[in-house]
Amino acid sequence: MVRGNLRRQYSEVHLASSSPEETVLMLYDGAIRFLKEAIRELAEENIAAKVHLLDKVEKIVEYLQSCLDRENGGEIAENLQRLYDYMLVRLTEANFYNDAAKLEEIGKLLGTVREGWAGICDAAKKDQETDSSQPEKDSAATKNITVSV
């Protein structure tokens, strides 16, 4: 019990000190971890635990979907919207029919999107490091980057 509380406190501090990009990355990591755990529980025929874990995955995907900036996100936001819709349908089917193959498919999709997002985070960090190492020449030339999922 104490270990669980310490882990939760660490996660809360880590989340509070993370950039929005890192927070999205953590959401993908959590969804993938819960999905893997659900697959293990399904293999062990622990249906109640599988349902609980898939509920967490569903809530994360729904949250990621709710954060999409459909006005400014263009084609990327539209494609992610469709992908999240697809994942949610497959999650429901996999949960109802206890279908590990569908869960693995969702895991691959989440992994692919996570890799792309990690690349975005790495690029943003490099840009930030480059900007902070160079003296500011003109305040009008500073970059403002807004990341919307």
Image (cartoon, rainbow, N blue to C red):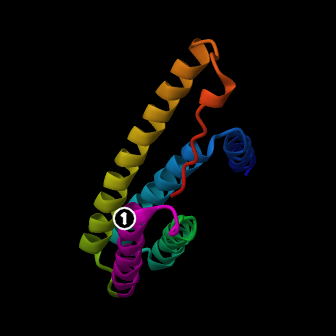
Residue 83 visible at all: yes
Q: What residue type is disc 1 on?
A: Glu
Which of the pair 71/113 is nearer the observer?
71
Main SS, magenta residues:
helix
Can you give x and y, in whole percent of width and height, for residue 47 in the image? Answer: 44, 78
How many badges with numbers are in the image? 1
- 58 over 15 or under it: above or below: below
- 74 over 17 or under it: above or below: below
Q: Residues within 10 Å of mark 1 (few under 14, many from 20)?
A: few
Q: Which residues are magenta?
A: 70-96
Give the SS element for disc 1: helix
Q: Is residue 139 found inside the magenta-colored segment of the image? A: no
Can you give x and y, in whole percent of width and height, for residue 147 in the image? Answer: 54, 49
145 sits left or right of 14 in the view: left
40 sits left or right of 2 in the view: left
Q: Which residue is mark 1?
A: 75
- 21 over 65 or under it: above or below: above
Which of the pair 149/3 is nearer the observer?
149
64 sits left or right of 116 in the view: right
Residue with the most extreme left position: 101
Q: Residue at x 47, y 72 (%)?
A: 54
Can you give x and y, in whole percent of width and height, for residue 26 in the image? Answer: 54, 48
Q: Quadrant of residue 109?
A: bottom left
Q: Is residue 82 found inside the magenta-colored segment of the image? A: yes
Which of the pair 138/107 is nearer the observer?
138
Residue 41 visible at all: no
Which of the pair 5/129 is nearer the observer?
129
Q: Residue at x 57, y 65 (%)?
A: 67
